[in-house]
Amino acid sequence: MRKPYSKNGWKTLVFSLILLMTLGFQPVYAQTVVSGKVVSAEDGEPLPGVNVILKNNTSDSPVGTVTDFDGNYQITVPGPESILVFSSVGSVMQEVSVGNKSVIDITLETDVQALSEVIVIGYGSQEKKDVTGAIGSVDAKDFEGQPIIRMDQILQGRAAGVNVTNSSGAPGGNVSIRIRGANSINGNNDPLYVIDGFVGGDFNDINPSDIENIQVLKDASSTAIYGSRGSNGVVLITTKSGKVGEPKFSFTSRFYSSSVLNTWDLMDAGTFAEVANQRANDIGTAPIFTSQEIADFKANGGTDWQDEIFRKGTGQEYQLDYSGGTEAVKYFISGNYLDQDGIVINSSFKRYSLRTNVAAKLTEKLDARLKLNFIRRETNNVNGNGNIGSATGGVTGWSPTVPAYDANGFPTVRDNVSSIKGNPIEGALNDNINENNNFMANGGLVYEFIDGLTLDVGFGASYINLQNKTFSQGSISNNPTASRQSTEFLFLQNTNTLNYRKVFADVHDFTATAVLESQLKKTDQFGANASGLQFPDLRYNNITLAGGVGTNSYFEKQTIQSLIGRVNYQYNSKYLFTASVRRDGSSKFRGDNQYSTFPSVAVGWRLSEESFMPGNIFDDLKIRGSWGQTGSQGIGVYGTVTSFLTGDFDAATSFNNGTLTPGIKIGNPGNPNLKWETTTQTNIGVDMLILNGRLGITADYFKKSTTDLLLAQPLPQYTGGGTISTNVGETENSGFEFSITSTVIDNLNFSWSTSLNASFLKNKVVSLAENEMIFVDGDVGAGITNLPEGVLMPGQPLTSYWGLKYLGTWKTDQAAEAALYGNVPGDSRYEDVNGDNVIGGDDYQIIGTGIPEMLFGWNNTLKYSNLTMNIFVQAMGGYDKWNFTYGQAISAIADAREVTHADILNRWTPENQTDIPAFSSTDVVELQSSRFVEDGSFIRLKNVSLNYDFPINQEKGVKLGLMLAATNLLTITDYQGLDPEAYSNNGSADNRGADGGSYPNARTYTLGINLNF
Amino acid sequence: MKNIIIITILVFSVSCSGFLEEDLSTIITSESGALKNESGLTAALAGTYKPLTATWQSGLGNASTQAILMGADDLTTHKASNKADFREFDQFKVSQQNGRLPFVWSGAYKSIQGSNNIIANYEGATGDPAVINQIAGEAFFLRAYNYFWIVKLWGKAPLVLDTQVFDPAILEVSSSEPQAIYDQILSDLDAAIGLLSDSKPAPGRANKGSALAVKAQVYLQMAGWPLKQADKYAMAASTAKELIDNEATYGFGLMDDFADLWPSPTINNDGNKEEVFALNFFAGQWWNGNAVYGLPARPGEDNGWDDYFSELTFFNNFPDQRRKDFTFQTESGATPWQNFATARPYFQKLQGDRADWLNALSLPLIRMAEVYFIFAEAQIVSTGNNADPDALEALNKIVRRAYGLPLDSPDAGVDYTSATQQDVIQEKAWEFAGEYCRWFDLTRLEMVESVTATKDPSDLQPLGTIEYYLPLPASEVLTNPGLGED
């Protein structure tokens, strides 16, 4: 059944890529009038590959050449007034007037920009060469000209160790972002987002065009500075700011067209009806269709549910920004409007954003900054990842013999043949609208007391107003329902940073940072829901006229107060040392557990600065090591007390049919001894830069151990059931990360730069206290599965699937053995683990894992003259998907009473003994079996884009750009579902990979126009 | 300098004391004394009934209630469709992981936790004493009623009376013997009878009569297997008699027509006087509907779920009478039941007023007719007189109704002039076909084997040894392995 990806295949891929990237340095020759030799100022060695370009060129095509292996060049120039420009990656550019000279020798100064690049770290910044932690950087230039509509697309495949999975392929839909795996079972595993210093933002609430750069803090020495919220890694986002100079104006518009990647191979109505009758015959019940009906279906066809649900999704986006400044005031202003329809009917994403970033120098010693951002997001039907009852799941459940619409033009209410769920069209036409309005203000003052000593006082406020509106037609139960939910979040933050940097005796570089930070978060919520709507056409807009109305309100407040200290010391740019400590106090805990301390330490050794290293090989060679502790951010409020459940779902009952009496019910018992989960991480890494900075390699090994893991320990029902949160478990993540960046070719007319990253992750549960296992019910297969779908077990990954092991069908020569199980040849055969000749719950075992072990990203930018091409390949491997949607389509069980998938035509017969079971009254099709667990590995051509710049007026910098791009153009996978990336699990536990009608990712074509002046 | 001052003020402005104190003012916690007054107790009572009606989570509100009683001869399920969890009960091979197994167990124990909380708090609570006594009485009633389900289905089980406060020691508790559980049930019922008022505050709640009915059921059950305390027959008879004699006081009585007991497309008959104890449902939301009735009880031919329907022998032996017409669905349109996919008749009386799984309909768990049967049986056995006139009259009222005759007019054509315990049990089986009596009558009189032997060959046959008790749900032994040990 399964064809697991060959691990050797992956290796071959990686090695050939590396080979490609290191072999590409080729010289190009030209004819000559002027010639010369270019050498390096550092060691006098010849410099190959230096661009020699005629600056004041008047002809249509560019004039230029490149130095050969010996640093020699020859070029024809128009005359003595010509100016030549010598440039090369890793060197300072030089301009020379030709004059009467026929030989011009050049000495180029080394400038490895990559080393002097300043990196934002938590509560400060550092030059890249001095960084001792493991930090992944993505810069705006890495994704410019690519169709990015949300921040997660920037991270996807572009930073080693970061797994970005679009669990819902809908525009603006759910995405899972994990840095170095998942630590927590019950807590949140999302990274902490810090937007311009504001801790705890939402990456959805930022227009990607406003992003200057993103730093992903991975190891504990980088994240410990965020203490109790650092365990899952930290993503630092810095937005653009204006630069001194003429005002710059940029306008971009993009048009999108999306379609489904793949469709199910479902039977047409006639074939379906025949198969249904064959099944009825085989299990001894009456035929469902008459031969006349079958003939009619063959002649007239039936319903193609996929055609009804999927569509071509179109979209448009407009971006306008304006920036500039003087020494005194710098500004960046941008506006963005995005309107994108999903590939499933009635799913859409709209975004309006407005940003103003202003920085001002008030006095010689006082700087001020203010960043204002308003963003409104409107989504409909993008967050439901679906289950087999959803619109996307329903297409494989509903019979093609049922008309899509009834005589009155309404979606047919019931499928009297196959699915017992509602019509997928009706499901898709229901609404689940979220309108998220976020206003964020983030400002501060920096005062320099003396040279090197600054105080930064920052304030941040974020106000979010979230309106949720739902409507469900509910025809199948004749019960239209609607709800309105209104939530306000208020975050306030104050950060006071005292920073002191001093260099003693030219070699002792010392920086100390002290921070006092407080944060407050309030959540205020109320809502109403109604059932039995008397006027369903009014949807959620008038829910008073209803059979029953329920209301809720809620408030919570949480606070954190923190003290932070950090010391950076480096000796002669050779030996680097960093130590930090953060003490967090949290309102969530009691007594001694209220405050926790999170320390870290890191060292670095820049071998390339040592005299014993040969001078001309390494531009940089650094070995790094770090250790530190962080906490988990994902514990809810009120965990230390036993609170009563008061919601209608939990506690309201009916004392008089059709009415509801609210009540209170004892909830999960509180645990006054709760504390943070603690993650201890060790990291060893190496950074290398060679070939004049043209090839950079970073490699890291990490090991993270999360202890005091918060487990919701299940309590027996006789105690009142539920769970009690206890700090008892332990998980471990370890892995390797590599990233290679290279400027492979950099010629006059053509350049190719490429970057490759690869991550390998091992994730496992180490201990669950005294529990041998804890079940996690994803409920993706609700209605077709009975037992919990996930399990946690020591030694196994966090997401493990629980089910029977499928051994294929019983074959004819196994009839006697099959009979022991009450089966006949052609029936499903499962592994009888305990050998009791009965297949039951005690034969369940782990049959797969959803956590990817391997991630790859390969990004290429090729430039030819004014044409730029980006090719971006992304791959994920070493995980399983649980294909419930296929299971529903190929099985006649519970909620899906007939088979719809064409694979059934190849079912077992005595003559053709396949592993697709025959129809038989003794066959038990168990959805929770390895039969439906498939390898999810895939390689995807994530982006191919072409950008062409028309230089309209070079002197004034007026430029018109055209862009054509394809996203998800090609996917190579063995997975049988619509998309190996999307999955349906939704929940607190890091359960993933089960696909029951999840919203698939789309293939999107983008056409863009960009105007700059 | 001015700048420094401003900055310093800003820095310290937020560092006030009490910043980290958790704000518990907006939630109800175990520490807030919520149950110390009438309104708190009222809310807690709703939360105590809730676990019995949380349709898809716990309790009695879905067809799992029929599933766990499927060992009886009246109920069976689909042979081919994936009703494996139902079939396990019908075929006496129930696994601990069976998805239908935990509903009654977890509903009962969550409700018991709610009762424990009310019982621990009602004394000294402020408010109207009449209201508080009624609530406390219902808490005692529910605790008894829930333990009664537990002891009948599982025998030995944890007897926990203080689960309102979590104590880790409870994870090592062992199961109590049935006798101890019955003792607690009787003591709780007496407390309930002392506290409850005569009339139900709402159709879905209990009154004193409800408690008397359960007490009669309990005595009858104790008289048979496994305790076999024959003296309990007389106590069952006298308790049932007390209730019958005062039925009007409690608003109870027999309906004149069997047809009027059940929902029909035109009238739902909810809250009729025969409902001694009935759960009520909201059904405005998917999580609270009567899903025993409606689609689960309907055939696939009518878009039903085929969850449960009648065994063949049971239907064939059912005497032809008006009651049979209203008990069974024997055709769908022009298709007779013999041509249904399952080739069995369905229980029309449990099909609700429309084809739905989300029904705002009563689920009567105890009907007054059962009290009449308890009296008849217990009186005949305890007096040894098969012609005890009071017993015969109680029995004959229901028999006359079954034939569409006036209840109180003796009719020689149908009246029993002498009845054995077996006669009463059989008559009760017809009356309560598909309801919640048959399995318990069969087990207490140890008749399961003999009726199973009469199964039609085409009905689902036992796969394992016939067991009178169910296995503990997997969740219970996973966390407390000692629970299942003897």
Image (cartoon, coloured by chain):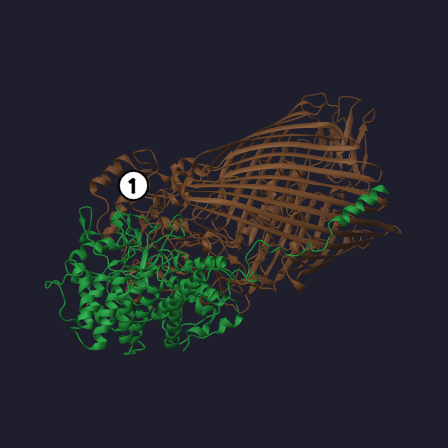
Chain colours: A brown, B green
Q: Check the image and name the residue furthest to the right.
A: A505
Position above or below: A630 against A747: below
Can residue B224 be seen here? The reply is no
Q: Give the quarter of the figure containing the N terminus of chain A.
A: bottom left
Q: Check the image and name the residue furthest to the left.
A: B413
Residue A222 horizontal side relative to residue B228, left or right: right
Position above or below: B45 against B483: above
Position above or below: B281 against A205: below
| Figure disc tally | 1
Q: Amino acid at mark 1?
A: Thr
Can residue A773 be seen here? The reply is yes
Residue A798: horizontal and vertical position, in percent?
53, 59
Residue B355 horizontal side relative to residue A584, left or right: left
Nearer to me, A936 or A291: A291
Q: Quadrant of residue B180?
A: bottom left
Position above or below: A257 against B64: above
Residue A161: horizontal and vertical position, in percent?
61, 51
Residue A374 horizontal side relative to residue B452, left or right: right
Nearer to me, A910 or A54: A910
Q: Residues within 10 Å of mark 1 (few under 14, many from 20)?
A: many
Residue A952: horizontal and vertical position, in percent?
66, 22
Q: Quadrant of residue B103?
A: bottom left
Residue B209: horizontal and vertical position, in percent?
33, 64
Nearer to me, B301 or A922: B301
Q: Quadrant of residue A430?
A: top left
Residue bearing the label numbered 1: A401
Q: Give the quarter of the figure containing the C terminus of chain A.
A: top right
Secondary structure beneath label 1: loop
Residue A260 horizontal side relative to residue A964, left or right: left
User: Which chain letter goes with mark 1?
Assistant: A
